Image: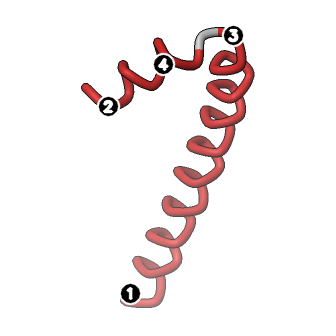
Amino acid sequence: MAKESKQRRNEKKKATMTLKERRAKKHEKHQQRTEHLTDHDHEEL
């Protein structure tokens, strides 16, 4: 049972990483247009 939970945790971590990477890529494209605006938004969040 312990091994199973560890595997599930790793899978979740991998999934979140890929999602973050996808979002980062989207933000990169958007930042090129409005860099200072997004910077301020992220700092506040």
- Percent x, y of residue 20: 57, 43
Which mark, by number, is residue 15?
none
- Mark nearer the viewer, 3 or 1: 3
Residue 15 pos. (x, y %): 59, 53
Mark number, residue 43: 2
Q: Furthest residue to the left?
A: 44
Q: Tell me which numbered mark, 1 or 4, is placed earlier along the sequence.
A: 1
How packed is label 2: few (under 14 Cα within 10 Å), some, or many (20 or more)? few
The CA span between labels 4 and 2 is 9 Å
Crowding around mark 4 (Cα neighbors within 10 Å: few <14, some 14 to 19, many 20+) is some
Q: Which of marks 3 and 2 is nearer the N terminus?
A: 3
Mark 1 lies on a secondary structure that is loop
Are discs 1 and 4 less than 8 Å apart at CB?
no
Instruction: Kindly identify the amino acid type of the residue bearing the numbered disc 2.
Output: Glu
- Mark 3 — residue? 33
Label 3 secondary element: helix
Depth check, front residue: 27 or 31: 31
- Which residue is the site of mark 1? 1
